[in-house]
């Protein structure tokens, strides 16, 4: 007679020998794991792409904030807020997603999650330096297969740091090379806003009964247009205002000026600040023909002189000041070989690291061609067709010359 224990052993043995249904059981166990593994593989690839987009966005955001701190003088809080919003916008543009986390909550987005900081440093040698750091994260939703393992989202973290400084473009020597030939006395199409009309006298007499002309002086009000030389003086004032704003203590900016017509006039020597150079420009008359060669050669010699480096090093501690020439004309050189000599000087100056800004002011084709070839690149060439454009060009040159440098440090 089979006991209860024997029956249990027999049933167990039969169960172990019976292979029916094993495939279904193994499939039920392995399939979820296989599917989850495939889901993880897909999400890993997506994680790499999204994290790269998030890092690029953070890098762009810190660079933008650092640049704004150096150039615009915004507060630390404004810079951090700018970085956060910039990061969110860039991430949305690059990744094509809203930047919201998995639940889409408005208070749980890339910019809301980000944490930023600003560190300011000031030294006598390099002015101000700004370090902007931004840390943020994005909760990437996983696909349904990965969710089988219990992961419905993955947190992707990034950090970026960028630095901006007012050093590289604050220490500079700039030489103004300006055309004062006779054509600079011509009028422009821009009315003098401060005095829009001028009184003009004319002979308004008449013939008497004997047929003799009897003179009489009358006056009328005509539009008062700037002359080219007047526009140049306004433009120079705008340029020097940008330099003065960047160097209120007169310890980083040195300027000099020279004018030319058929020959070079006596230039000013380099001095700290802009006072002497601006006074020189304000006193310029307009007369004579045009030959820029000697004036450009003098500017190149003086701006690259070892004495300029020494002056900066002794005053502000910098031994690599920016070297600039601003070359302006309203006409063609009409002296023998003037273009050839001027171009040779421009080539040598650019080779020596001098940045050359050129401004063609209502100039003919020949003058424009010379200035295009002399300019450091196309962004350094300006074609001003009226007084307002000339003033704007000189202002932008001042801004570019004093522009802060920005770099990514992480």
Image (tube, helix red, strand yellow):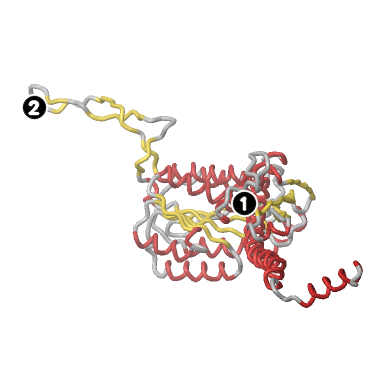
Residue 369 in sight here: yes
Question: Whole-percent x and y of residue 58?
Answer: 67, 53
Question: Whole-percent x and y of residue 310?
Answer: 74, 61
Q: CA distance from mark 1 to mark 2?
A: 71 Å
Going 56% across and 62% down the picture, which residue do you hit?
298
Going 41% across and 70% down the picture, which residue do you hit?
337
Residue 187's image quarter? top left
Residue 203's image quarter? top left
Which residue corresponds to mark 2?
211
Q: Which mark is residue 403?
A: 1
Going 33% across and 32% down the picture, which residue do you hit?
223
Question: Whole-percent x and y of residue 242?
Answer: 59, 44
Residue 41's image quarter? bottom right
Q: Is residue 342 above or below residue 139?
A: below
Question: Whole-percent x and y of residue 292?
Answer: 46, 61
Q: Is residue 84 above or below residue 173?
A: above
Instruction: Find the residue positioned furthest to the top.
Output: 209
For label 1, the crowd category at 10 Å Cα-Cα, with few meaning under 14, some 14 to 19 and many 20 or more, is some
Q: Nearer the viewer, residue 295 or 153?
A: 153
């Amino acid at each position: 007679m089979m006991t209860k224990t024997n029956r249990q052993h027999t049933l167990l043995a039969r169960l172990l020998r019976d292979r029916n249904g094993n495939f279904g059981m193994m499939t039920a166990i392995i399939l979820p794991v296989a599917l989850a593994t495939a889901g993880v593989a897909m999400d890993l690839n997506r994680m790499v792409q999204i994290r790269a987009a998030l890092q690029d966005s953070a890098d762009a955001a810190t660079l933008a904030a650092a640049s704004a701190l150096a150039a615009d003088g915004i507060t630390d809080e404004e810079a951090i807020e700018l970085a956060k919003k910039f990061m969110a916008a860039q991430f949305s543009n690059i990744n094509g997603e809203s930047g919201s986390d998995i639940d889409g909550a408005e208070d749980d987005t890339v910019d809301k999650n980000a944490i930023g900081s600003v560190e300011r440093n000031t030294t006598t040698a390099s002015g101000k330096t700004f370090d902007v750091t931004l840390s943020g994260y994005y909760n990437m939703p996983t696909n349904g297969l990965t969710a089988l393992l219990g992961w419905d989202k993955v947190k992707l973290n990034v950090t970026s740091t960028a630095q901006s400084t007012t050093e590289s473009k604050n220490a500079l020597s700039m030489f103004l090379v300006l055309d004062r030939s006779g054509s600079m006395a011509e009028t422009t199409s821009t009315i003098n806003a401060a005095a829009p009309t001028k009184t003009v006298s004319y002979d308004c007499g008449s013939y008497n009964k004997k047929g003799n002309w009897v003179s009489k002086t009358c006056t009328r009000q005509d539009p008062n247009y700037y002359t080219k030389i007047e526009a140049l003086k306004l433009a120079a004032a705008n340029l020097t205002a940008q330099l003065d704003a960047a160097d209120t203590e007169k310890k980083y900016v040195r300027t000099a000026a020279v004018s030319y017509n058929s020959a070079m006039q006596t230039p000013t020597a380099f001095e700290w600040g802009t006072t002497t150079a601006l006074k020189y420009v304000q006193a310029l008359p307009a007369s004579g023909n045009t030959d820029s060669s000697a004036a450009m050669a003098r500017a190149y010699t003086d701006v690259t002189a070892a004495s300029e480096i020494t002056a900066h090093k002794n005053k502000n501690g910098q031994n690599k000041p920016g070297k600039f020439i601003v070359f302006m004309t309203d006409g063609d050189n009409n002296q023998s070989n003037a273009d050839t000599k001027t171009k040779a000087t421009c080539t040598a100056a650019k080779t020596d690291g001098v940045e050359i800004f050129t401004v063609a002011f209502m100039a003919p084709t020949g003058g424009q061609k010379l200035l295009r070839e002399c300019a450091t690149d196309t962004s350094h060439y300006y074609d001003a067709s009226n007084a307002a454009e000339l003033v704007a060009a000189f202002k932008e040159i001042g801004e570019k010359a004093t522009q802060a440098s920005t770099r990514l440090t992480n």
